[in-house]
Image (cartoon, coloured by chain):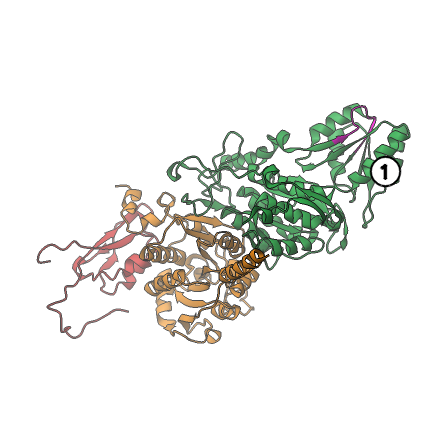
Chain colours: A orange, B red, C green
Amino acid sequence: MTTIEEFDKHPLSRYVRVERFPHIWCEGCGNGVILNCFVKALDDLNMDMNKLVVVSGIGCIGRIAGYIKCDSFHTTHGRPIALATGIKLANPRLAIAVISGDGDLFAIGGNHFIHAARRNIDMTVICSNNFNYGMTGGQFGPTTPLGSYTTTTPYGNIEHPFNLVHLAAASGAVYVARWTALHVKRLTASIKKALQKKGFKFIEVVSPCPEIYGRRNKLGRAVDVMKQYRQTSEIRHGYDPSKAEITQEKIIVGEFVDIEKPTYAELLQKQFFKVQKKLKEG
Amino acid sequence: MPVRMWRQPLDIEKVKRPKAEIHIIKNQCKGCGFCIQFCPQNVLEESEEINERGFHPPRVIDENRCVLCSFCTSVCPDFAIYTVEKACKDGC
Amino acid sequence: MEKERTVLSGVHFMNGDDACAEGAIAAGCRFFAGYPITPATEIAERMARRLIEVGGTYVQMEDELASMAAIIGASWAGAKSMTATSGPGFSLMQENIGLAVMTETPCVVVDIMRGSPSTGQPTEGAQQDVMQSKWGSHGDYEIIALAPASVQEMFDLTIECFNLAETYRVPTFLLADGFTGHLWERVVIPQPEKIKIIERKKPSVPPEEYLPFKPDKDLVPPMACFGEGYQVHVTGLTHDERGYPKTVDPKIQHELVWRLREKIRKNSGKIIRTHEFMLKDAKVAVVSYGIPSRASMNAVKGARKAGIKAGLLRLITVWPFPEKKVEELSNRVKALVVPEMNLGQVVREVERAAKETPVHFLPKIGGELHSPSEILEVVRRAAKA
């Protein structure tokens, strides 16, 4: 039996474009795990794959849009959230998932992130945080820890990294969670929760980048990094995101924010009915 | 994460443990070792054979140990391993 | 939505920006994403007020990059979408304009040009972005750009921009200058049945047989939008007919980029529109576009009165450049005169097409309009030489 025929028997194969596998990601890359958890969540929710749109940016994780079997858009660097805003507002019946990287969403795309969160546009944003720009060879980014080695910080990073969950919560996201690539069951549950909730949801996934970031910072193989996640991660639901920085000793994971807030589309619709009523009254 | 039972559950006669079939798509595996490392029942180990990509795919040591937690299914970055509940005939 | 509210048929006294917004709504535009910038802010303001009345969506994005990205997304979700900006915002939009070209996304970008470069003269009109609309983004590509010369044309040509965008699946530009944008003139908005609207081609095959980027004979692929069951993958990377990235095959890159270019070039005969005035027996021809055409028209009339056989070729379509028309014209006239509100953009294309025929250039920057007498003076000189 060919590999594709075998793959077709996999319970989740109908959610991916099997003809495009094997995917381009390295051995042990967290992106593969994110893809797996995402399609598992879709399967559990019995998602209508004709009503889902996946938008991604540039980076290794950006290729995910080409692997999921649904309408998808692989945009220019940093712009998936802006593009997704256009899709959502033009056709509010579509469910939008933006899956992109730490650099794409928070460096070049930082402005779009905070504004979409502020507006509470209904979309689920999943950030694959591997602490560097992997696709281009391993440069530092807005989440690279202080002192890390990357190709553009050969003497160690001197920039303080973002605390992504704090940024998302401060910008107004209604659901903020952080998991690592090891917490597969909880990540799947978080994605399911996010896809069913209304508003701007953010899930940070701490993922290993074994070939580039891991190698340069002597973190070992991907499985060693995952073992490290097991040692250092602590599940604290409801923890104050402003205190949840990622450090060598501790990665606080869990669901930090879970609130309700009127979405942009809901407010727009309210306004639409008000305007229509006024026009009818002449 | 590994669950070690040190006492017999009180309803062990009534509750049937699920039986699993473990499927490994050998040529899809990239040898990351996640499934082997994190299986709570130590069902898998690295095999000696080399797949067409040059990696050692996992090998099932004892399928009866598997409790269908499906952790390997979810943690595999390459969709190379999955568990399916074995269809239960009488007395399984 | 009642039709009367969608298309405001009747005679109006309107501002150029407002006429543009009304033209968009009449053409079926139901999504506008923009950012305020003088002198295009009025388009955003009018859209903010009017779109909700007709069931559309106005969103003010955080910057022009986001605006361009949002209209691409909205177009793929099935809506006719538009943004409006001026020089500085236009520069910001370039990368995503390239994305719209590569993904064959129909959308309309209105550029109310103002004094440039950089922040320049926000309240003075200019024609300094013409080259940027064609060459602004990286790479080889073709786009369509129209230049209105009156407020009526702000209405009519916006509709035409939408029709061209939908027909050729390409971002189409309305290159108005700041004066036309803020000019108040009489506009006649026809009855909705009289307005010709073109919708994008839809696939005629079921999803299993559909190849999203396989062109028809006219080099334009039918477009299945998101949510219609076709599960299309769209990417800015070089892609094959299925839409999947194929970046290391020279054949695929060549086929794709060549087709995106030929899509416009091959169909340029159907796209290009010009207006000819007294050109049949002309010895000196003025080639202009946008608001200088009004002064050029007066200058040509004045020249004729003075016994000079002058004529006017007004370019309604600036890109693709009507090079065949200009070349043919240059073969039978003595000289060409090109007035522009910049230091030389379309004139370069005219010179290229005119070859040996002398081209007299009349630049004007700073916010003053060409006067008919200035153009007449150059026509006189051209006729004598």
Q: Quadrant of residue A112?
A: bottom right
- Image coordinates of residue A61 in percent, x first then y, are 45, 55
- Image coordinates of residue C40 in percent, x first then y, are 69, 53
Q: Work out whether residue C352 or residue B5 is closer to the camera in this orientation and state it.
A: C352
User: How many numbered callouts?
Assistant: 1
Q: Work out whether residue C104 or residue C27 is closer to the camera in this orientation and state it.
A: C27
Question: Which residue shows up at 71% across the image and 33% down it?
Answer: C274
Residue neighbourhood size for the residue with mark 1, other residues' Cα within 10 Å, grouped as few (<14), some (14–19), many (≥20) = many
For disc 1, the marked residue is C375
Residue C385 in view (yes/no): no
- Image coordinates of residue A120 in percent, x first then y, are 50, 64
Residue type of the residue flagged with mark 1: Ile
Q: Chain of mark 1?
A: C
Q: Farthest residue to the left: give it.
A: B91
Instruction: Tell me the element at label 1.
Output: helix
- Image coordinates of residue A250 in percent, x first then y, are 41, 73
Q: Give the magenta-colored segment's residue range.
A: C276-286
Residue C75 in view (yes/no): yes
- Left or right: C175 as drawn, with respect to A135: right
Q: Is residue A52 above or below residue C135?
A: below
Screen quadrant of the N terminus of chain B? bottom left
Screen quadrant of the C terminus of chain B? bottom left
Q: Is residue B1 magenta?
A: no
Q: Is residue C81 above or below residue A223?
A: above
